[in-house]
Amino acid sequence: MKFVSTIVGLIVFILFFGFALKNTQEVNLHFFLDYELRGPLVLMLLGSFVAGAILGVLALTPTVFRHRRAVTRQQSAIHALQAVASKGTAQPQPDSVDTPQ
């Protein structure tokens, strides 16, 4: 399986490298306030991809921390219940009923 993943990774690298070689023309990227950035198209695409990935991770950060807090609370509740169960408390005895003779 490691061999197959290495071959697939090599093929993907060759495809991306070929893409980069074919897209080296200069492009202008216009921002607000008349700010302009010039560079090769492939670097602009790579920069946009990286910026999107970073924004995606930042958007997920609050959710990840919320889930971690919930897991911690649930684990502490589980440990507390296991501690109570491991004390070996005797089962409650049923009420005795005196039968008339």
Image (spheres, grey):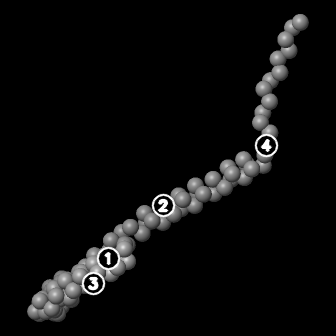
Q: Where does residue 70 sit, x and y in percent of width and height?
A: 53, 58
Disc 2 or disc 3, which is closer to the eye? 3
Disc 1 crowd, CA 10 A, few/some/many (<14, 14-19, 20+): few
In the picture of the structure, the residue carrying the numbered disc 3 is 10
Numbered mark located on residue 67 in the image:
2
Numbered mark located on residue 4 in the image:
1
Disc 1 or disc 4, which is closer to the eye? 1
Disc 2 or disc 1, which is closer to the eye? 1
Disc 4 crowd, CA 10 A, few/some/many (<14, 14-19, 20+): few
Classify mark 2: helix, strand or loop. Answer: helix
Please name the amino acid that badge 2 sits on.
Answer: His
Query: Which residue sits furthest top?
Result: 101
- Of pointers 1 and 4, the one earlier in the residue sequence: 1
Classify mark 3: helix, strand or loop. Answer: helix
Disc 2 crowd, CA 10 A, few/some/many (<14, 14-19, 20+): few
> Which residue is at 37% across, 77% downward?
2
Numbered mark located on residue 89 in the image:
4
In the displayed structure, does residue 97 sit left or right of residue 28?
A: right
Closest to the observer, 78 or 65:
78
Quick check: marks 1 and 4 in contact, CB under 8 Å? no
> Which residue is at 32% across, 81% downward?
6
Instruction: Name the quadrant containing residue 8.
Output: bottom left
Quick check: marks 2 and 1 in contact, CB under 8 Å? no
Quick check: marks 1 and 3 in contact, CB under 8 Å? no
Closest to the observer, 63 or 91:
91
- Of pointers 1 and 3, the one earlier in the residue sequence: 1
- In the picture shown, does residue 87 fall above or below 42? above
